[in-house]
Image (tube, rainbow, N blue to C red):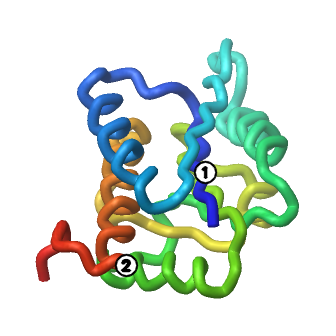
Amino acid sequence: MKITLLLIGKTDDDYLKKGINKYLERLKHYIPVSVEVIPALKNTRKLTKGQQKQKEGEQVLSKVSSGDHLILLDENGKEFSSEQFAKHIEKKMITGTRCIVFVVGGPYGFSDEIYKRCNEKVSLSRMTFSHQMVRLVFTEQLYRAMTIIKGEPYHHQ
């Protein structure tokens, strides 16, 4: 199985970049992981929130293949404990899912077309995080899931 993290806009802060890269590097020992950045929209002052979501959605859909399992990181998604998330990922691995694409959307969320195409939604917390911070939190949780699956001591119960 392969995992792709699809992001709207680049990561701005160096401390976030360092943390994200730390966990992405660690993840390479467990599973193929790639990050694809869709450039942030320009001249958004002239666009409504709906138009922004629509344009971002078109860009996301252009990067997703028909066989990809699309998971949105969404505030209204299913919440997991770290152990539950690890079991969820492991189940995808066992059942032969070839590619999971996790998407961190733009500031206004996702378009209706993205919601229709997605296979599931996952929430990292009931709290709200910046889209930049979500990237770090998610990569750490994905790394944690891999160590749980492998029975390694990173996660303590």
- Using the rendered view, name the quadrant where residue 44 is placed: top right
Q: Are marks 2 and 1 in contact (CB under 8 Å)?
A: no
Viewer-closest of 139 and 152: 152
Question: Relative to 46, is 81 on the left or the right?
Answer: left
How far apart are the two marked residues, 2 and 1, measured between alpha carbons?
19 Å
Question: In this image, 61 relative to 33: left or right?
Answer: right
The residue lying at 38 percent from left, 68 percent from top is 146
The label on residue 149 is: 2
Outermost residue, left direction?
Answer: 156
Identify the residue shown where x is 67% and y is 22%: 41
**Mark 2 burial class by Cα count in 10 Å: few <14, some 14-19, many 20+:** some
Determine which quarter of the picture holds residue 116. bottom right
Amino acid carrying label 1: it is: Thr
Q: Earlier in the sequence, mark 2 or mark 1?
A: 1
Query: Helix or strand or loop: what does disc 2 sit on?
Result: helix
Residue at the image position 69 percent from the left and 41 percent from the top: 53
Q: Which mark is residue 4?
A: 1
What residue is shown at x 61% (from left), y 24% (from top)?
40
- Expressed as whole percent of the image width and height from the top left, the position of residue 140 reads 31, 54
Is residue 129 visible to the viewer in this orientation of the structure? no
Q: Position of residue 8 (x, y in %)?
A: 59, 35
Asked whether the viewer can see residue 85, the reply is yes
The answer to whether 25 is drawn above or below residue 1 in the figure is above
